[in-house]
Structure formats: structure tokens, C-alpha cells
Image (cartoon, helix red, strand yellow):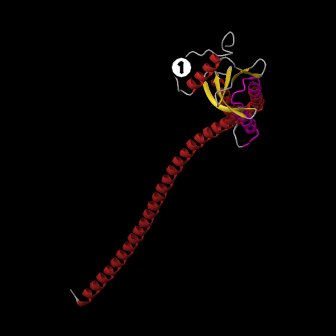
Amino acid sequence: MSKSYKTILFSLLFMTSTLFANQIDKSLNVIENTNTKLKNYQNKIDNSEAQREELLSKYKYTNADLKSTRIYNNQLSKILQSQKNELKNIEQQIIDIEETQKNIFPLMLRMVTSLEKLVEMDTPFLLEERTDRIKRIRASLDKSDIKTAEKYRIILEAFKIEYDYANSIETYQDKIDGKTYEFLRLGRTALYYQSLDLQNYGYWNNDTKSWVEVDSSNAKSNIRKGIKIAKKHQNVDFLNLPFLTSKDN
């Protein structure tokens, strides 16, 4: 082979290699650009999926919160309705209480008046004590710091005290016309006195509203016995006293 032919062949090979290399570079560049675009697309897809997951999570949370809110609002509505009903009941109770108080106050006044008349017409035992009690009760009716229920209780207690007098016996000291005597009360129907020197005796006549002096030694003896029994200085025994028997002794 001649030298010139070799030179031409070499030149052709060089040119072919150069062209092939350029073509390979172009192909590599296309592949690299394609991979870059695919990578960008994948990033976009990943970002979209992350956003979708985030939006889905927010939707689930919001939906659950909305459901809880609806349940709470429903319960709250029931509570509010119950409170409205309770308020109506309280308002009605206030009206009833006010109406009751308007009716009960005149009743209490009449009860106190009845107590006054009872003491006035009754045997005059413990007169000062009973009269003072009624005065305190009447004064309490005008006091705003004492509740109506307490006022009513005080009046009922006074009636109970008066009732209990009918079933008891007692002795105490009091005065008649400034002079001190020992008194014997049997229930609320019989009242006797004995002077401290044991010389004078008598009993209260409720028909004549006056004291009657006792002259009978037997009656005096029974009054003394009754006082001892009331003081628990003697056992209970039968008493033969004026105003308790068919005739005075």
C-alpha cells in the first residue's frame, strides 16, 4: 500500500472517529437532559403527593373536629334548654314564694293575736314570761334579717309551749300586789299561791278573774303537798284542793 493511500485512510478514520465521538456526546447530552427532566417531574410528583397527603390529613382532622363540634353544640343546646326550663321553674317558685309570703304574714299576725288573747283569758300563771315571749315574737315579725320560715317556727314553738303547760305541774315564785308568793300550777286550769311564811293561801278563780283566799287547813296542807311534789321533794300523791273538787275544802 502506498504512503498516500495510508494517509488518506488515516484521515478518513480520524474524521469518522471525530464524528462518532461528537454523536456520542450529543446522545449523552440528550440522555442527561432527559434524566434531569425526569428527575424534575419526579420531584413534582413527590411534592404533589406530599401536598395530597397533607391536604388529606387536614381534611380528616377538620372533619373529625367538625363532628366533635356538632356533638358538643347538640349537647350544649340540650343544656341551654334545660337551663331555660329550670329558669322558668325558679321564676314560678319565686312567684309562688311571694304569693305564699303575702298569705302567710297575715296568718302569722292572727296567730300572735290568738296567743295574746289566750294569755289574757287564761289563768295568770307565769304572766310576765308569757307576755314577754309574745312581745318578742311580734317584734320579730317586723325584722328583715329573720326569714319568714324562722318567724313561723318561733310562733309554732310558742304554741307548743302553751300546749305543754296543760300537761305539766310546776312551782315558781312571783308577786301579787308587790308581795312575793310561792305558786303551784296544775296544768293550765288550777293556780294556787302560798306565802313564804306559810300563813296565807289562795287560788285563782277564772270565772271571777280574782284570787280567792283559802281558809281550810286541809286545803292548805294539800297546797303545801302539791308544791313539794312539783319540786320533786315528795312522791306524787292524790291532792284534794279547791277548784279541783266538787266543793271547796
Q: Residue 245 at x, y = what percent?
A: 66, 12
> Is 143 one of the magenta-colored residues?
yes
| Residue located 52% across and 23% down the image | 234
Name the residue beneath numbered marker 1.
236
Q: Nearer the viewer, residue 38 or 3?
A: 38
**Which quadrant does the C terminus fall into?**
top right
Residue in the image at 46% along x and 59% along y: 50
Q: In the image, is 58 to the left or to the right of 160?
A: left
Drawn side of residue 25 relative to residue 201, left or right: left
Identify the image quadrant of the N terminus. Answer: bottom left
Depth order, front residue of 207/36: 207
State whether the magenta stretch is mostly helix, strand or loop.
helix
Vertical arrangement, residue 23 with respect to residue 9, above or below: above
Q: Residue furthest left?
A: 1
Q: How would you rate the neighbour count of disc 1 (Cα within 10 Å): few for under 14, some for 14-19, many for 20 or more?
A: few
Residue 51 in the image: above or below residue 207: below
Q: Nearer the viewer, residue 89 or 15?
A: 89
Q: Is residue 21 left or right of residue 226?
A: left
- Give the x, y percent position of residue 128: 72, 34
Residue 232 highlighted magenta (yes or no): no
* Left/right of residue 154 with respect to residue 238 in the rendered view: right
Residue situated in front as seen by the camera: 59 or 227: 227
Furthest-top residue in this view: 246
Return the x and y of residue 80 as percentages of the image width and height: 64, 40
Q: Which residues are the magenta region? A: 116-144
